[in-house]
Image: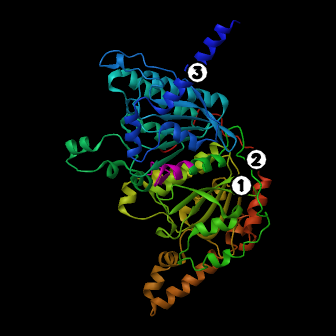
C-alpha cells in the first residue's frame, strides 16, 4: 500500500471519529442546552450511567431518514433521533435503545423505528434483557402513516418478547399517545418526577373534550402512575437514582426464560434463626404490623426490591434472595387496609406472579389476610373478575411455590393466596395461625344467631360460642390435621425451613395441559 493510500485511510478514520463525536455531542448545541436546562441528560449520558463503563457498542449510528417534503429533505441528521446498541450491566449483556430528544424531539419516524426493531430482534436472538430509555414526542407527523406503522412493529415485538426476555422501560421525558403503549407492554416501568409524563391524550385535548383542567404531571406524571394508575413500577426524583435502580433490578433478573436468575454469594447463613419474628408479628390477629419487616428478616442480608410500592400497598410484591437464589415474594400487608385483597391488589399480585412464573423465579407467599374488601364499589368494579386474575395466575404457575400462613387466613382470600388446594407445593404455618371460612366472631354470629338472640345474656353466650368455634375449627393444628398445611413451624425456624424447601424444589418440573393458551379473566 502506498503512503498516499495510507494517509487517505488515516484521514477517513479521523473523519469517522469526528463524525461519531459530532453525533454524540449533537450538532445543535442549543438543543443540548435546552435539555440540560430541563434537568435532563442526553441519550448518550443516560446510556453511560446505565451500562458498565466502556461496554456500549452502538449500532446504526449513521442511519438517516428517507422522508421528503414538509422541510424534511434538508434535515437528515445521523442517528435519526434514537441511539441503539448493547453493553453490560454488572458484566451481563443487555440491549438498549434511547430516544435522543435533541433530534426531532425524539419523535419516531420510519428509520427511527427500524433501528428499534433491529435492536429488539437482536435482544431476542441473543437472549438478553432489553432496556428502553423513553423521551420522545410521539409519532413524527411529517412521515404520516409510516411512523404509525413503526409503532405497530414495536408493539408486536414487545408482545413477542413478553415472557422470553425481561423488558424494562425507563420514562425520562414525554411519552404520549401511542408511544405510551410500549412501556405498558413491558415488565417494569420506571419514571422520573417532573420531567416524565405518560398519557394517551394531553391536557389540551382533555380540557376540550371534558372541560377538565389539568397539568401534564397531574394527568400523567410519575407519581400518578406509580400511585394511582399502577402503570409505573417506581418513581424517582432524578435520573441518576432511577438508572441506578434499573441496574440493581437487572442484577436480580435472568437473561431470558431459559436461564436461571444469577446467584450471588452471601454471608447470611441459610440456617440463621429468625426468633425476632415472634416479636415483629403480634399474635392478636386484629393488631397491625409492617410485613416488610418480616421480609427483611427472612431474606439474605435484609435486602429486597419492592415492585410498585406506591400502588395497592395492601399487598407487597418483591424480589429478594434466599441463600443467594432469587425468589419472588407476595405478602399481605396488615399495615394497609388490614391486608385485605381488593381490585388493585389482586391485579398487582397477579401480574407479579405471572411474571415470576414466566422467568422461572420461585414464589414465596406470606399470608395474613382477613378476606376480600367488602363494598358496593368493589363488587360493581368487578372484584370477582379481578380476584380471579390472581387465582388464575397462581393456578397456572409451574415454578416452586411455598405458602407461609403467619396469622389469619380467612375465606376465599386464603384460597387465592396460593393455598395447597390451588397447587402450592408446600404450605407452612406459624403456631398462631387461624385458617377458617371467616373470623370466629363472624362465624359465631351466623351459626348461633338464634341461640344468642334468645339468651338472657346474649353477650355472654356470644363470647362462649366464639371460644367454642375457635377451639374446634380455628386451632393451630386444624388445617395441618387435614393435610392442608404441611408443617406448623416455629417463627425462629422460618428462614431455614423456606430455604430448605426451595432447595428441594429447585429441580421441579411441571407440565400444563396441551393447549394454545388459556383464557384468563383479563
Q: CA distance from mark 3 to mark 1?
A: 63 Å
Residue 417 in magenta? Answer: no
Whether residue 386 is situated above or below residue 468 in the rendered picture: above
Q: Which residue is mark 2?
A: 508
Q: Which residue is mark 3?
A: 14
Viewed as shown, does residue 49 lie left or right of 424?
left
Label 1 secondary element: loop
Q: Position of residue 81 (x, y in %)?
A: 44, 29
- Find the residue positioned furthest to the top: 2
Viewed as shown, does residue 363 lie left or right of 119?
right
- Numbered label attached to residue 425: 1
Q: Nearer the viewer, mark 3 or mark 1?
A: 3
Q: Say which quarter of the image contains residue 66.
A: top left
* Res 333 visible: yes
Residue plotted at (43% across, 37% down): 181
The range drawn in magenta is 229-243
Q: Nearer the viewer, mark 1 or mark 2?
A: 2
Crowding at label 3, few (<14), some or many (≥20) Cα neighbours within 10 Å?
few
Amino acid at each position: 500500500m502506498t503512503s498516499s493510500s495510507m494517509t487517505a485511510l488515516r484521514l477517513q478514520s479521523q473523519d469517522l471519529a469526528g463524525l461519531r463525536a459530532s453525533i454524540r455531542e449533537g450538532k445543535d448545541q442549543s438543543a443540548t442546552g435546552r435539555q440540560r436546562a430541563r434537568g435532563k441528560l442526553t441519550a448518550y449520558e443516560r446510556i453511560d450511567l446505565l451500562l458498565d463503563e466502556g461496554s456500549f457498542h452502538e449500532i446504526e449510528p449513521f442511519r438517516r431518514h428517507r422522508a421528503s417534503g414538509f422541510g424534511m429533505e434538508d434535515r437528515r441528521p445521523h442517528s435519526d433521533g434514537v441511539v441503539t446498541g448493547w453493553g453490560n450491566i454488572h458484566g451481563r449483556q443487555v440491549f438498549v435503545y434511547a430516544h435522543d430528544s435533541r433530534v426531532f424531539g425524539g419523535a419516531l419516524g420510519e428509520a427511527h423505528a427500524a433501528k428499534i426493531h433491529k435492536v429488539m430482534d437482536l435482544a431476542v436472538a441473543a437472549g438478553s434483557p432489553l432496556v428502553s430509555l423513553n423521551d420522545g414526542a410521539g409519532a413524527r407527523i411529517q412521515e404520516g402513516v409510516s411512523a404509525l406503522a413503526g409503532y405497530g412493529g414495536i408493539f408486536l415485538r414487545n408482545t413477542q418478547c413478553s415472557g422470553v426476555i425481561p423488558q424494562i422501560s425507563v420514562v425520562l421525558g414525554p411519552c404520549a399517545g401511542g408511544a405510551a403503549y410500549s412501556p405498558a407492554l413491558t415488565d417494569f416501568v420506571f419514571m422520573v418526577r417532573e420531567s416524565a409524563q405518560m398519557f394517551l391524550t394531553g391536557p389540551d385535548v382533555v380540557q376540550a373534550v371534558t372541560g377538565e383542567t389539568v397539568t401534564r404531571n397531574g394527568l400523567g406524571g410519575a407519581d400518578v402512575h406509580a400511585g394511582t394508575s399502577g402503570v409505573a413500577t417506581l418513581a424517582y426524583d432524578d435520573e441518576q437514582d432511577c438508572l441506578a435502580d434499573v441496574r440493581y433490578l437487572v442484577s436480580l433478573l435472568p437473561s431470558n426464560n431459559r436461564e436461571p436468575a444469577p446467584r450471588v454469594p452471601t454471608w447470611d447463613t441459610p440456617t440463621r434463626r429468625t426468633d425476632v419474628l415472634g416479636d415483629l408479628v403480634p399474635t392478636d390477629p386484629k393488631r397491625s404490623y409492617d410485613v416488610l419487616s418480616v421480609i427483611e428478616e427472612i431474606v439474605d442480608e435484609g435486602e429486597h426490591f419492592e415492585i410498585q410500592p406506591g400502588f395497592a400497598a395492601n399487598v407487597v410484591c418483591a424480589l429478594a434472595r434466599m441463600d443467594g437464589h432469587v425468589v419472588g415474594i407476595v405478602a399481605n400487608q396488615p399495615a394497609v387496609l388490614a391486608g385485605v385483597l381488593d381490585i388493585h391488589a389482586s391485579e398487582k399480585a397477579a401480574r407479579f406472579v405471572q411474571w415470576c412464573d414466566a422467568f422461572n423465579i420461585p414464589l414465596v407467599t406470606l399470608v395474613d389476610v382477613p378476606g376480600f374488601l367488602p363494598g358496593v364499589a368493589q363488587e360493581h368494579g368487578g372484584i370477582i373478575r379481578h380476584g380471579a386474575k390472581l387465582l388464575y395466575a397462581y393456578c397456572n404457575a409451574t415454578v416452586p411455590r411455598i405458602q407461609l400462613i403467619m396469622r389469619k387466613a380467612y375465606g376465599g382470600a386464603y384460597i387465592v393466596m396460593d393455598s395447597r388446594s390451588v397447587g402450592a407445593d408446600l404450605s407452612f404455618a406459624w403456631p398462631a395461625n387461624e385458617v377458617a371460612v371467616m373470623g370466629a366472631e363472624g362465624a359465631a354470629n351466623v351459626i348461633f344467631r338464634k341461640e344468642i338472640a334468645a339468651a338472657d345474656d346474649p353477650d355472654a353466650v356470644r363470647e362462649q360460642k366464639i371460644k367454642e368455634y375457635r377451639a374446634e375449627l380455628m386451632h393451630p393444628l386444624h388445617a395441618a390435621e387435614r393435610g392442608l398445611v404441611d408443617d406448623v413451624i416455629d417463627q425462629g425456624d422460618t428462614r431455614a425451613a423456606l430455604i430448605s424447601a426451595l432447595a428441594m424444589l429447585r429441580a421441579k418440573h411441571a407440565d400444563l395441559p396441551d393447549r394454545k393458551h388459556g383464557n384468563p379473566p383479563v
